[in-house]
Image (cartoon, rainbow, N blue to C red):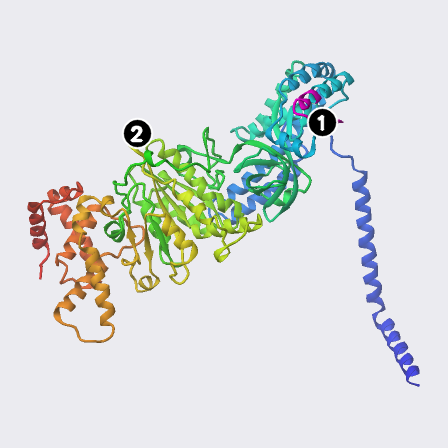
Amino acid sequence: MAIEYVIINFLILAGIIVLFCRKTIVRLFRDRRQNILRQLEQAEQWEKMEPPTLSEAHFDQPAVGYQEEIAAEQAIAQTKLEQIHAFGHRECNEIHRIMVEKTKRQFFAQIKQAVADVFLTEPYHTKIREKEAALVDKILSMIHLTPGDMAYLKRHNVLYVTLTSAFELDPALVQKVDEATTQLLNTVGGKTSLWVLQDPAFIGGLRLRIGDTVYDGTVSEQLYHYEQSINNQPVTPEEAATEVLAEFSQKAAEFTPMIRVYQLGRVMQISDGICWMDGLADIMYGEVVEFECGESGMVLDIQPDRIGCVVFGEYENIESGSRVRRVGRIAAVPVGNSLLGRVVDAVGNPVDGDGPLYVDETRPIECGAPAILNRSPVSRPLHTGLKAIDALVPIGRGQRELIIGDRQTGKTAIAIDAIINQKGKNTVCIYVAIGQKETSIAEVRERLVQHGAMDYTIIVAANASGSAATQYIAPFSGTAMAEHFMYAGQDVLIIYDDLSKHAVAYRELSLLLHRPSGREAYPGDIFYLHSRLLERSAQLSPECGGGSITALPIIETLAGDISAYIPTNVISITDGQIFLESELFHEGQRPAINVGLSVSRVGGAAQTKLMKQMASSLRTKLAQYRELSDFTQLGSEIDEVTKKALDDGARLMEALKQGRYQPLADWKQALLLFAVSEGYAKSVELTEMPLFEKELYARFEQEYPSLVAILRSGKKVEVDGLNDLRAALSALFVRN
């Protein structure tokens, strides 16, 4: 009975649904059927459409056949430009760069097809075929065995030889190649295995590959180098297309491809920005490789059976099994005066929207540090414009001074102030931003522009959205740019902001390269990484030009822990450290420099004689003040002597306060410290110290220009000068 009731209820429910929902169900299925039929009709129409053909009209106007696509992209780009106008032109330049690169690729694809059509017609086809015998002779005169080939023969006793041409070769030429390669290997006791292939993509000529080494005399190889030159020259795609097409059309009959020698390998595996390759047995550490998709990378690991490299661009475009080409040069970046005022990425490409960057000189990113005999002692000051630094922890030209502290304690502010203070002092500044947000880098650039500091500054940006590979090479690229100026006899200030993120990027790459991790999961060579970077900063001897690189690396600590692995490494490499304390920062002491933990191993040698004289007792007084201040917090009663010491110390601390982007001249710092330490500001309230400071500078410049001239000289003030200085201060301010 229960089953019968269930069946009856189901039939009643079905009847209700059919009665009341019939129209809705029918409409849903009808709309679905019409949508499917509409899509099938569109697919049939697309199949009937003829594909676009290449004709001479393709070269009459830019990017014919791609006009609709480019017009759509330009419309999208224009909308995007309007949306981000307030942010700046950083992203605008990126959109423009992508569109230009795509247009160049489209033009070059047309050029390659047009050149292929030229060589397939008479009399060009016959002429190029007649040159094959001479081309074979030229290639055979160049063949040799590389050390990598010798190592492969020892393991396998056979070396593979591949002869590839655009057209079917004369059997006599194939026999000639076989005999020559066999004779070459007979001298070392090896065998050859010859493969003869045909590839129309070569257009003309032929290519011989022995092991990993390629002897390329094809038209496609010539076009490849034309494409590289087009990408590196300030020419428009239209001009490039017209120029290359005209040259190949006019000289096709006399065309003889150049023989270019390079090595090829194969991609075994690609993931997380790391590419494993085989072949390329003669490649070196730090060498650049190029993939079929156009991306490039740098070799960071060489093992007996494979090679590991980091990819600079989008590694998603690289496929396993694709070919990788040895470029034949160590990773390098552009250098020179044309970089001044620009923002570039880790490989030297401009990212500031101020147009392309064309330079004639490059420098390897990895380079040996100057020898000891080529250095001179650090003896010239590099003024940061900050009273607390120039007086307590002076920095000399050629020194490496670490800026260390917790997050948001003013580390970058010190570096930017130091750059601003170099205006008019013939010092080139380089700011390397590692793992920072694009907005932070844009803000730094804007501040430097406002203070007129970008004219002598280069910003190397490896932002947080970039790959670990670009963050890894960014400080080395910045140092290479700095070395160009140093060896030319100029002074350079370079900021690494910051090396903590650099160490994290290197740890990521190392772990992906399967290197063993040690303390705090960092690889064991992390110390060598930073030491070989910072040792390149030096003061050169006069015989070597007398230039210098002053390095200010920045390290971020956690909860003030300077005993962590990376901080202790960099502390042991540098010539001192400026420690910024969070407690002082929150108390309003800016810059928040902890005098007890900050030190400069160069010391007074990096100070002017004036500053050394005026600040000789400053560190002692501040140390005494900190000790007494901590003691009086216990609530005990203090005598008059202790109270006076506390008051004097509080005024000194207040005098050392300084706002951002307000660097001071050295003579002003010395004058203020002398006035405060001698007691001329004793009656000034702490809140009125900024007014006292401004009035001091203004009245001295107005009423005592002779004393100002003595102070500007930076020389030690003699006894008579000190008496005149005290008399002037007594006349201006009442000393109690």
Q: Is residue 185 magenta?
A: yes
Q: Nearer the viewer, mark 2 or mark 1?
A: 1
Task: Confirm whether residue 343 shows in the render.
Answer: no
Question: Dot 2 corresponds to which residue?
Answer: 543
Q: Is residue 508 left or right of residue 656?
A: right
Viewer-closest of 371 and 222? 371
Question: Dot 1 corresponds to which residue?
Answer: 191
Query: Can you say whether 606 is above or below 122 in the image?
Result: below
Which residue ends up furthest to the bottom in the rendered image?
1
- From the top left corner, tell me how far across and down residue 630 is, in percent: 25, 68
Q: CA distance from mark 2 to mark 1?
A: 55 Å
Q: Amino acid at mark 1?
A: Lys
Q: Is residue 455 left or right of residue 436?
A: left
Viewer-closest of 218 and 728? 218
Viewer-closest of 206 and 178? 178
Viewer-closest of 566 and 319? 566
- From the top left corner, tell me how far across and down residue 212 is, in percent: 64, 31
Task: Classify mark 2: helix, strand or loop.
Answer: helix
